[in-house]
Image (cartoon, rainbow, N blue to C red):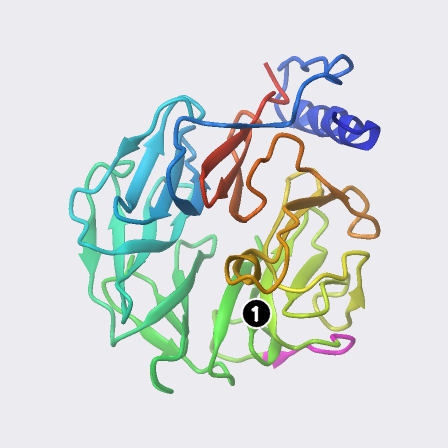
Amino acid sequence: MISIRTLLFLQILALSILSACGDDKIQDFSNQNDETFWKLTSFDSTLITVLAPHPAGSIFAANVGFDSGIFRSMDNGDNWNRLNAGLKDEYVRVLAIRQDGVILAATYNGQNSRFITSTDTGNTWSEKILPKSLNIRDIAFNSSGHVFIASVESDETSAGMFRSTDNGQNWTQINIPTITALDLEITPEGEIYAATSRGVFRSNDEGNSWLKLNEGLSDTIVLKLTTDIDGTLYASTDQNGIFRSMDEGFTWTQTGLVKPCIEVLMSHPNGYLFAVVGFHAAIYGCIEPEGIYFSTDKGETWEQLNEGLTDKKVASLAFSSDGYMFAGTTIGIFRSTKTTTQ
């Protein structure tokens, strides 16, 4: 049974998307008490590590397993097509899609990463040569289309960050003062925030110089970063939950979700936050999986959003362009039962 607060969340979410979508109509959620929020799609096989919406309206997914690869759905998850032309026997760890439709992905074979791109909505892929053996954890890009990758250490020379201004043809190593970069967040103004094993760093000059921003962080192993519509910055940590900064990272305060191992953190365009507690820790049996949490008040309070989610080991989240929410789990992809627009 969906809680009253979840219903309010859906109604307000619908209103926020309506304001951005002109004459789109609102679904009536007032009589949804007998329906669950999540339903398993036709992609119901293996661990889904990546979900990403394409500007043209499709959804991309990547999985891990004997049939690993990249998949695309053009009908909101009802059907999925494999897109493995140009891929090798490896799994996709990261996939990012720019507003111009160019898809950037990093694969991993257990030892090092490959960087691949597609300019035709995933039908074909081409490899871009990396400067050295890397273990890529994240891909981000700024408004100019410049690409940034974060790599964890296979050795000290391969850790940190790298930048390309020509879609991966050439790379420059960025001198970030740390050895393990885990996640990147780039604002519309071009500020780069890096989540690292030594806290949060910020650069205002495409990575040429960095400022360490840890005041108020009681845990400096930072796993994920996200910003909301107001520019508020959020950081999830290894052991002490989610922190919030309203001054570009200079100071941090702890939010109401004090849980370990929050490895999925994202914001919706209306400012709502979504977090997943303990994916890898649950996989290894260290903690019980708790599924998805959401907050409507900048992280002050949180509620679970798990109705119908039969697998709470969630590795990825995404919103489609028309309002469906997707969750990638160890048994496949779930989709919200209702869209917020019609």
Q: In which quarter of the image is residue 233?
A: bottom right
Q: How many labels does the image show?
A: 1
Q: Is residue 28 left or right of residue 136?
A: right
On screen, residue 7 above or below 98: above
Which residue is nearer to you in this view: 15 or 144?
15
Q: Determine which residue is flagged by label 1.
A: 195
Residue 269 located left or right of residue 153: right
Residue 95 image position (x, y, % from top left): 38, 50
The single residue placed furthest to the front in the displayed view is: 285
The image quadrant of residue 34 is top right
Task: Give the percent coordinates (x, y) of residue 195.
Answer: 57, 69
In the picture, the quarter occupied by the N terminus is: top right
Name the quadrant containing residue 194: bottom right
Q: Main secondary structure of the magenta part?
A: loop
Residue lying at 27% horizontally and 39% vertically, measured from the top left: 122
From the viewer's perspective, is 240 left or right of 317? right
User: 84 above or below 58?
Assistant: below
Disc 1 secondary structure class: strand
Compared to residue 236, the image places residue 79 above or below, namely above
Q: Which residue is drawn at 24% across and 69% down?
A: 130
> Where does the image place residue 286, in percent across and percent down from the top left?
59, 65
Image quadrant where one finds the C terminus:
top right
Residue 200 screen position, x and y as percent: 62, 73
Q: Give the range drawn in magenta.
A: 211-217
Q: Residue at x 22, y 36 (%)?
A: 123
Give the residue drawn at x 34%, y 80%: 154
Which residue occupies the foreground of this view, 245 or 100?
245
Above or below, 80 relative to 192? above
In the rendered structure, which amino acid carries the disc numbered 1?
Answer: Ala
Residue 140 falls within the magenta-colored stretch: no
Q: Quick one: 185 or 34, which is closer to the camera?
A: 34
